[in-house]
Image (cartoon, grey):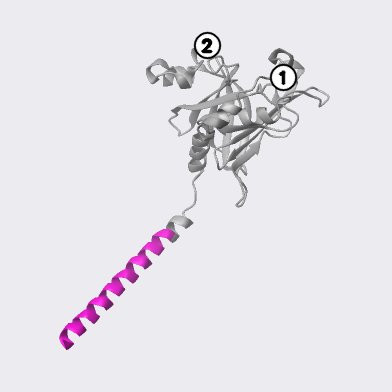
Amino acid sequence: MGINSDSGGSGGRARGLVLKALVLFGGVLLIKRLRRSTTRWDHARVVAQALSDEKLSREQAYRDPDNYFNLRLIVFIAFEMVDGSRVLYFEQAFSRTPQKPFLDKFYIVKPCPKEMKCDVELSSYAIRDTEEYRNFCDRPRDQRPQDEEVVGDIAEHLTTIHLCRCERGKRCLYEGSTMPGGFPNSWNGASYCTSELMIHKNGEVHTWDRGYDDDGNQVWGPKEGPYEFKPASNLRYDDILSLNFSPTVSLENKIEGTFVMT
């Protein structure tokens, strides 16, 4: 019995040493992973993936129908360029008529230049032939313009937003805006426009695009605050039913000076 006891004790000590070694090894791996810095391209990838979804302003329009439309925003990664930049197709429509978008454009997502104090550069571009891209995200892949066509259809530069990773403790993942002074824009009497963007951890995207005239007066865009787009997949079925309201003011009367046009 004494021999068996010694053997059991030795076996227990051996198992304890193995367990300690495994814990130590796992701790080293965890520390290495935590210390590993996020690369510039990691930031760009996260932003591209966070934007790529169907999102709705339905709840906000229900709360404040006088200032916000019930809109559908959908973004799709069209393709990845040789240098790693991602080209996104952006489309916006009324939620009731998603097949009739009133705004579409391209985004190019890439890391900020090393000399700038930001993480991601998000630039928007006009589309050379918008009719070719209507409902791009809802089409089968073989019915979408191919990569080489997309490159050829990237037209004039519209705006650039510089995004930074949000500070720890905030609800957002990334936030940023255009540079002071904005970008040239002539729609509805504007001379320049500004854009702000915030990407939240829960998948929400808040956008605030505004146009100003030469005197600094806002001539288009929401005045109360940004549009709040929530992922369509997060809306419960009963919420969607309750939010299918009829607007009290006709779209024709509200349309002027409200859309996001950058």
- Is residue 37 shown above or below 251? below
Pointer 2: what residue?
131
Left or right of 86? Residue 60 is right
Whether residue 96 is visible, yes or no, is yes
Q: Residue at x 75, y 21 (%)?
A: 191
Pointer 1: what residue?
248
Q: Amino acid at mark 1?
A: Thr
Q: Residue at x 69, y 15 (%)?
A: 251
Q: Toward the viewer: 60 or 256?
A: 60
- Residue 172's spot in the image, x, y percent? 60, 43
Q: Is residue 219 magenta?
A: no
Instruction: Report the span colored magenta.
Output: 1-30
Main SS of the magenta segment? helix
- Is residue 233 shown above or below 189? below
Looking at the image, how many numbered discs can be counted on the residues? 2
Q: Toward the viewer: 230 or 200?
A: 230
